[in-house]
Image (spheres, rainbow, N blue to C red):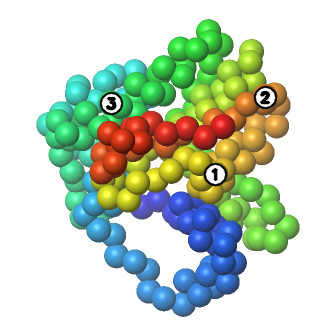
Amino acid sequence: MALHSRFGGSIADRYMNCAGSVALCATVPPKKVGVKAEIGTAAHDLAALCLTTDTDAAHYVGEFFPREDPGPLGRFLCTEEMARAVQVYLDAVRAELALTPDAEIYVEVGFAFDLPSADEGEVFGTTDAMVYHPSTGRLRVFDYKHGEGISVSAEDNSQLKFYAGGAVFSKPDWRLTKVILTIAQPRARDADEVGKIKDFE
């Protein structure tokens, strides 16, 4: 089971607005993992596999994910619906990768912030995918959301800013001229109105 930081990106908006929430949340029992969260994890595993093996999601329809560490609720079948949603994300990442011949892709890369106000290694996270272009200094940070409920905006998104900050601090030799934060949420209820891929520069 993957470790989760008390200061992770997915909860950055909460503790950035209420620092005391970290201590308060430590006093309550951990939240139970739901089926939808596990399906989201399976979709992320599928996406990472496709990006690292240069395959399309449809190739894995009928297979079970996660392939390793199935979690408390077991393994989940890759359906045609899951494959279609993940493919939207894959296409966006690959389109970014095709912009320059020297583009570099980073999939599920972990990082840690060295902060004087936290214990060593306590503030960490993992990006879904990043594409960096050394020739132009352009960095695009992707976050895949498989959920179909709440629509997540990319604008000034705390989670994505956390991931972008992790990328910048872990790659001090990068020369950045532009950072684009991208939410891929193809199954959101309003995806047809606001778009399945949302950017904030």
Assess disc 2: are there few (<14), some (14-19) or many (≥20) residues with their C-alpha within 10 Å of its C-alpha.
few
Disc 3 to disc 1, C-alpha distance:
25 Å
Cα distance, mark 3 to mark 2? 29 Å
Q: Is residue 42 above or below residue 158?
A: above
- The amino acid on which the numbered mark 1 sits, given as a three-letter code, is Asp
Q: Looking at the picture, how far across and down is residue 47, in whole percent?
A: 38, 36
| Residue identifier under label 2 | 177
Other-residue count near label 1 (Cα within 10 Å), few / some / many at <14 / 14–19 / ≥20: few
Reading the chain from its start, which is encountered first: label 3 or label 2? 3
Front residue of 147/35: it is 147
For the N terminus, the quadrant is bottom left
- The kind of secondary structure element at disc 1 is loop
User: Which numbered mark, 3 or 2, is in the foreground of this view?
Assistant: 2
Position of 132 relative to 119 (above/below): above
Residue occupied by mark 1: 156
The answer to which quarter of the image holds residue 36 is bottom left
Name the side, left or right, on which 185 lies relative to 18.
Answer: left
Which residue is at the far left?
62
Task: Identify the secondary structure beneath mark 2.
Answer: loop
Does 136 sit above or below residue 129? Answer: above
Which amino acid type is marked by label 3? Gln
Q: Residue at x 82, y 71 (%)?
A: 117
Q: Which mark is residue 87?
A: 3
Q: Is residue 13 visible?
A: yes
In this picture, residue 47 sits left or right of residue 22: left
Residue 63, image x, y percentages? 19, 38
Q: Amino acid at mark 2?
A: Thr
Which badge, 3 or 1, comes first in the chain's sequence?
3
